[in-house]
Amino acid sequence: MFCFTDIQNYHGQLKTGATTCAQAVQFYLDEIKSQQALNAYLEVFAEEAIEIANRLDAERLEGKPMGPLHGVVVGIKDVISYKGHALSAASKILENYTAVYSATAIEQLLNAGAIIIGRQNCDEFAMGSSNENSAFGAVKNAADITRVPGGSSGGSAVAVQANLCMVSLGSDTGGSVRQPADFCGVVGLKPSYGRISRYGLIAYASSFDQIGIFSKNISDAALVLEVIAGADDFDSTVSARAVPEYTQVIHQALGPKKIAYFKETLTHPGLDPEIKNQIENQIIALRAAGHVVEGVDFDLLNFIVPTYYVLTTAEASSNLSRFDGIRFGHRTTEKVEDLAELYKLSRTEGFGAEVQRRILLGTFVLSAGYFDAYFTKAQQVRQKLVEFTSQVFAQYDFIISPTVPTTAFKLGTQHQSATEIFLADIYTVYANLVGIPGISLPLYTHSNGMPFGLQVMSASFEESALLSFSNSLMQA
Ligand code: GLN
């Protein structure tokens, strides 16, 4: 039977003829079918995937060189455009929309030989932490189906966790790759802001959004990053810096590193005591391995969640104004008197409660009377965070923290209070506020049986160091 460990091993099997791309695709199609109850996929591109697999198998037999992602079976979060395929952002408002172009990241995957097997469920417009904000039903955590997978890229995390694809692409605006990776026990990488083109990614908060990668191990994340990172004429915010050979550098031996942790993250009242204990043990282990690990004061910690929600909702209210019932997606069939009413009804019917909440909040913080009190203040905090971060990285190579204060919570229990849910983003939003890369490594298991991770962050565009350090932690 087909068994996937990592891409390099899979490629070895393809070369010896031990397996084929068609067998791999069939394996995943069968798994997706038998685990349909997880609700990880909104749509599976079965026929097309089989066709591409057969073509790749034929080309390989003819001796055509294999692309770096030859036959790699990838799932994509349903916020990434794939030409000719439905694209819904898990929202009723885009339910019948078909993408008219492909995201640059998708083009690069396809050029490298990847097979895209389907689009994955998520929170509506990537807003949420449990995947329960999807208009197409919640996703279930494969480690315990009574629990959430996290969000917003819940389907993408579960797909890797439950062997429904080899790797997934998600998006991370405030933790949407790292948090579900933590809840599902997989690797979740959010690269630096501007490392991967966002052309073709549905915008939530443009100064935060970044495409991220879910995988079972570091080498696969490194390989996918190597393929999809880099300059793009279609995205003026993407960096033109050369893309290092991440797959090579991760195996380089690492000397002793200087690692910081923020003292306040470990004394945070919402932090599960077992998670705290595990991170403290990790600090001891890192010191024993020769690294310097020091606590740093971070008195802005309690400001980061409000700052994130002021700025992201402001940007979302502007980004989502294009979904007006005229140009895209759902339009009301009610009789209307004028254009304003058409907008209002179409948007009221099309957007779910959480998206509406955020559009309202964002419009409020941008309104004339409150702009300075909220938006300007939040931008000032963001600036302070950026300055603080460059001071930290002048002295340290990495920052470590828990990824999330708790393990995956029960489905249906998250609706107590929006503020409570927002506060659980406390460890992840920082990396997006300052643009640095972060990764969640599936290193631990809680006594409740659920996995949880360690978050490691580095200075911007230091993904090479981040990945090689992560690799050493995963091997240990
Ligand atoms: N939980 C965060 C939010 O709801 C993260 C979202 C994201 O990264 N897309 O905004």
Image (cartoon, grey):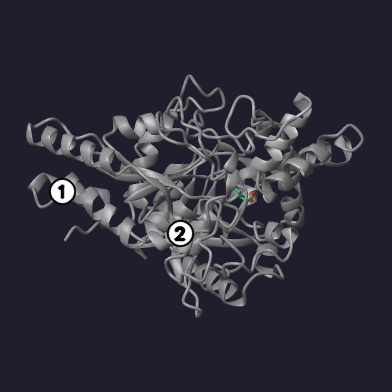
Viewer-nearest residue: 387 or 186: 186
For the point 46% across and 31% down, the residue is: 98
From the viewer's perspective, is 375 left or right of 235? right
From the viewer's perspective, is 238 left or right of 342? left
| Secondary structure type for disc 1 | helix
For the point 17% across and 50% down, the residue is: 23
Viewer-nearest residue: 382 or 252: 382
From the viewer's perspective, is 300 left or right of 459? right
Residue 270, located in which quarter of the rendered image?
bottom right
Residue 210 shows up from this direction: yes
**Amino acid beneath label 2:** Leu
Earlier sequence position, callout 1 versus callout 2: 1
Residue 189: x percent and y percent?
47, 49
From the viewer's perspective, is 265 left or right of 247? right
Are the residues flagged by discs 1 and 2 in contact, CB closer than 8 Å? no
**Amino acid beneath label 1:** Gly
Q: Which residue is mark 2?
A: 441
Q: Which residue is mark 1?
A: 12
- Mark 1, other Cα within 10 Å: few <14 / some 14–19 / many ≥20: few
Residue 471, located in which quarter of the rendered image?
bottom left
